[in-house]
Image: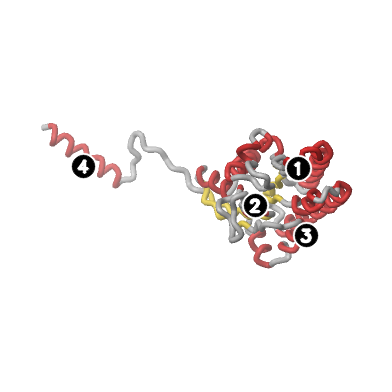
Amino acid sequence: MERVRVLLIAILSLFILSLGIPMEGDAKIPDRKSINYVALGDSLAAGWTPTSDENGNDGPGYPEFLAERFEQSNYDITLINHGKSGHTTSDVLMDLKDKNVQKNIKEADLLTLDIGANDLLGHLFNGNLAGLESASTIAVGNISKILKDIRELNANVDIYVMGYYNAIEPYESYKDLQPEILPLLQQFNDEIKKVTESADSVYVPTFKVIAKDYDTYLPYADVHLSEEGYQAVAKEFWKKMTPRKYGE
């Protein structure tokens, strides 16, 4: 008798499903929203780590980790990453003249940018603090131009611009210079924030989050983050993005 009852329940369940009637406990899965994401920037966007070899990267950068967060939130995301190691603000300005890059930006819902560090690092490692300040001014001016060019290509894209962390913390040889360099870095970040917000874009600070655990995020005498560091930066971007809606 029990076997007959189980069989009848199974037949009834199949009949209900065939009619499209939801059964108790069924959860409606929301539709996936499509989003086009373009990343521009230097080696941090490219995902270079201290253990990368000369042939390429050995892991994802913060754009890939950010894309993962969107996927986990039921977004169908397409990431096009134009980040390149060694890129300066001038290089990104040149990239924006490329028709393929322009096409990708025109179709983007979301764009992230980190750029400017390579404009400064040469002066930094030479101990040329006067040159560092001058390079900072030029870099900020170029970032302003970059954001203007992006806006001309796509007035509606949501743009997020990264501020820089203290990349010289792992270098013992530069410890004595930190009292002079850190105020310049703070000024650089303040200026990036200013031009970012002037372009109706969102500034994403990273200085404090990386400073919480230099041993994990900057484990070598290298300006590049570890994979855990990129994950931490991606989380900071995500915090700024979650109130927004995409793909509608």
| Image location (x, y in percent) of residue 187 | 82, 41
| Image location (x, y in percent) of residue 162 | 70, 45
Cα separation between marks 3 and 4 = 68 Å
Q: Position of 140 compared to 65: left or right?
A: right
Name the residue type under label 2.
Ala
Instruction: Decide if residue 241 is in sight here.
Output: no
Q: Quadrant of residue 179?
A: top right
Label 1 sits on residue: 173
Name the residue type under label 1.
Ser
Label 3 sits on residue: 90
N-term mark: 2 or 1: 2
Cα separation between marks 2 and 1 = 27 Å
Asked if disc 4 and disc 2 are in contact, CB closer than 8 Å, the reply is no
Which numbered tag is attached to residue 45? Answer: 2
| Image location (x, y in percent) of residue 21 | 33, 41
Describe the element under mark 3 as helix, strand or loop. Answer: helix
Describe the element under mark 1 as helix, strand or loop. Answer: helix
